[in-house]
Image: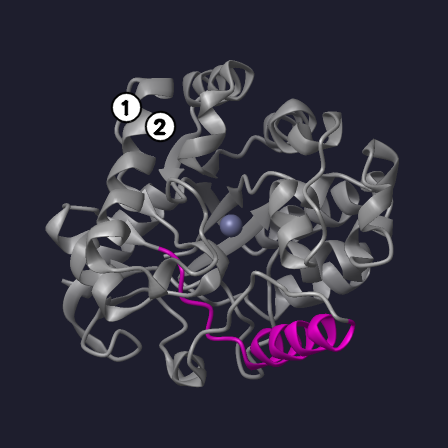
Amino acid sequence: MRLCAVSVDLDEIPNYFAIHGLPAPTGPEASLVYDVAVDRLSELASDLGIPLTLFAIGADLERKEAAGKLHAARAAGFEIANHSLDHRYDFVRLGRGEIRRQVVEGADAIERATGERPVGFRAPGYTISDVVFEVLAELGVAYDSSVFPCPAYWAAKTAAIGLISVRGRTSRSIVDTPAVLTAPTRPYRVGSPYWKRGDGLLEVPVQVTRGARLPFFGTSVTLGGPRLARGLARMCIGEPLVNLELHGIDVLDVHDGLEALRPHQHDVRVARDRKLEALRAVVEELRGAGYGFVTLREGAEQAARGLA
Ligand SMILES: [Zn+2]
């Protein structure tokens, strides 16, 4: 099996201000992901002839424009999956009842917008827990895709949170236990603890490269530019299911209205055309190696058959 699923977390712009401990934006930049990025992503996907899986945050769909965009994306053949109700960065620290509500009401909001209940889930901020997996299993969720067994990312995130606090601000981000770095890098059924194999829910980890487990996701692909992005893609070739995770912000730049993030986030300084070029390069590289492009749901179903 050589399949690749490209998924996009539709984290709206205020989430990035929260990560950096900045006051929430109030202008049109607050909804750039739904107002601008989704169209850009749809155009890219249609040019490349690939489906996307969009992970939506339920609360964003209270805006009817956002709900409309999601409905249109589903009608165009994209999968819509659940990225929780409120994208709480402390999601894993909430009580079981609130975790359950975050999952259920996120799915409810998506179902209202698209007419279809999502089957996949991704927790906010790459942090998950055994309790979350138990709740997902109780609710009949088909697959999860939150585990990111990437030492480089883990170290960078830990350092960034420290740096933000040194500067006197408080990041809303939290890091997962370092044990997650030992999790399988290919789809697996979770055990207890969840970073070990077992017979629980199907987990499709966010992609890391073979060997060094470098991050192969939107930030590294778009920051690195087309050449480096191709190099990272080549380092994933041979994996049965490449799970490339992007964010809506990966196709935006400072000129879209993100000037306030310029000092805090390198990736918004990269011109959007260059980012789109890097994303195209990755798809071409994988396609050239015989990969077929599917939704994450289809990829998860195929992977589950392989595990059975
Ligand atoms: Zn997110």
**Image location of residue 275, percent across then percent down:** 77, 46
Tell me the quadrant of the picture where the C terminus can be found: bottom left
Side of 215 relative to 98 (left or right): right
**Image location of residue 38, percent across then percent down:** 61, 28
Query: Could one spot residue 29 in this view of the protein?
Result: yes
**Image location of residue 136, percent across then percent down:** 21, 53
Task: Determine contact: label 2, label 1, CB under 8 Å.
Answer: yes
Query: Could one spot residue 44 in this view of the protein?
Result: no
Give the SS element for disc 1: loop
Tell me the quadrant of the picture where the N terminus can be found: bottom left
How far apart are the two marked residues, 2 and 1, measured between alpha carbons? 7 Å
Labels 2 and 1: the sequence-earlier one: 2
**Can you tell which of label 2 and label 1 is closer to the viewer?**
2
Amino acid, disc 2: Ile
Q: Which residues are magenta?
A: 145-167
Up-down relation of residue 82 to residue 160 (above or below): above
Residue 116 tag number: 1
Query: Residue at 26% across / 80% down in the picture?
Result: 196
Q: Which residue is mark 2?
A: 110
Q: Quadrant of residue 82?
A: top left
Query: Toward the viewer: 179 or 260?
Result: 260
